[in-house]
Amino acid sequence: MKIEKVENVLAGRWHFVRITADNGLYGVGESGIWGYPEASERIVDAWASYLVGQDPLRIEHHWQYLYRNAHFMGSAVGGALGAIDIALWDLVGKHRQAPVYELLGGRVRDKVRCYLHVGGRTANDLAADAAKAVADGFTAVRFTPFRDDFPSMRYGGLLEEAIKRVGAVREAVGPDVDLCVEIHRRMSPMEAIGLSRELARFRPFFLEDPILPDSPRSMGEVQKAIEIPIATGERFTSIYQFRELLEAGGCRFVRPDVCIAGGISHCKKIAALAEAFHVAVIPHNPLAHLDRGLRPDRRLRAELRAPGVHGRERAAQARAGRRAAQARARLPARAGDARDRHRAELRRAGAHAVQAASARHPAPRGRVGRGPVSRS
Ligand SMILES: [Mg+2]
């Protein structure tokens, strides 16, 4: 079996990838970078010329090749990798006629606990919405403790409002329901510590993204200063970022998103890293359709069956086709060509141990890659 086609479907802010094999089987994946979907679309275009002709069963190999081959990192790369990885797992699951979870080690749970995100303009509205969620069977609710006009509020008023809202929810749902408080990266470390000390009396289950997540060290300083467990990681894209977060003691829950953190393959590794730190995993899922198991709507399903049949997407597909043709002109047609070129470049640079490194890992493209060749 060989990969025959790699297609993008850009539908508004959603970016899907469909990978088709020469036997007609196909898999669908999705990137979660909804703020800049064209960015991951462009990356998938560039990678298509490598993927076409490859064996789709070698998912880990392709993941490593594409990650090391690119000199760049971040959300667009993580989203593109995620879309390809999910599509390949989907395809391989169909080929093996097995659910993907059986290919990953088998079913672990019979059911998964969920929270519902609740809201309301006032504290009373919020409490009523939380009570309704509990009446519907949810044992945990998530909400923001701020009003919509929080940017114009002073720190003291902000704290008072947060205390009122979290207190109202606790009173409405009782002691047996977990409260997940989402801060959406809105506070400085000092403010987050002050807020957490005020909210601790309501025993929140976790405080999500109290500060900007960019610095694991800062998140670690906040976590060490407060009692409420922190949940974070929804913007992270690699095991390296999660490792630093965990080493800094930055959270009690990691929240990787399969559509931005390199797909199913990479998120399984992130979960293993967290396990080694006694940190639990609460998968993040609002970035895309596929990572929360939602069925795309009718129009989108039609697109996925026959990409490019609708007006706006047809134009996008035409653009994508032109870009793919340009990318193919720039990139080597196959991975072997890239490796040969890379070896020649390394020889010119006087590098050594290329054979051994190449045997262990796919070689990165370019003079100085981020792979094992340049590190040895
Ligand atoms: Mg969040």
Image (spheres, rainbow, N blue to C red):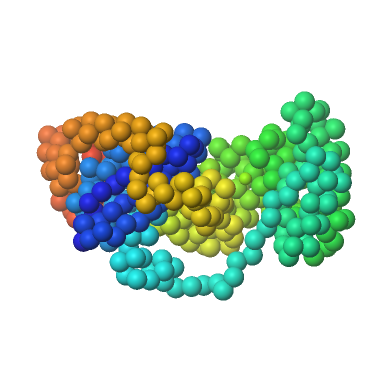
Q: Which quadrant of the frame does ligand 1 lie within?
A: top right
Answer left or right for 159 relative to 281. Answer: right
Is residue 299 visible to us here? yes
> What residue is shown at x 83% (from left), y 62% (from top)?
175
Answer left or right for 294 relative to 31. Answer: right
Coordinates of residue 194 in the picture (x, y in percent): 78, 40
Residue 30's place in the image compared with 153, above or below, is below
Of residues 242 and 143, the one drawn nearer to the viewer in this rendering:
143
Of residues 15 and 181, the one drawn nearer to the viewer in this rendering:
15
Of residues 25 and 343, the one drawn nearer to the viewer in this rendering:
25
- Image quadrant occupied by the N terminus: bottom left
Residue 348's place in the image compared with 257, above or below, is above
Coordinates of residue 187 in the picture (x, y in percent): 70, 35
> What residue is shown at x 44% (from left), y 73% (from top)?
106
Answer left or right for 124 relative to 351. Answer: right
> What residue is shown at x 74% (from left), y 28% (from top)?
151
**Residue 31 found in image quarter:** top left
Residue 52's place in the image compared with 96, above or below, is above
> What residue is shown at x 35% (from left), y 36% (from top)?
314
Q: How many marks?
A: 0
Is residue 68 visible to us here? no
Coordinates of residue 197 in the picture (x, y in percent): 80, 46
Coordinates of residue 200 in the picture (x, y in percent): 80, 51
**Residue 3 found in image quarter:** bottom left
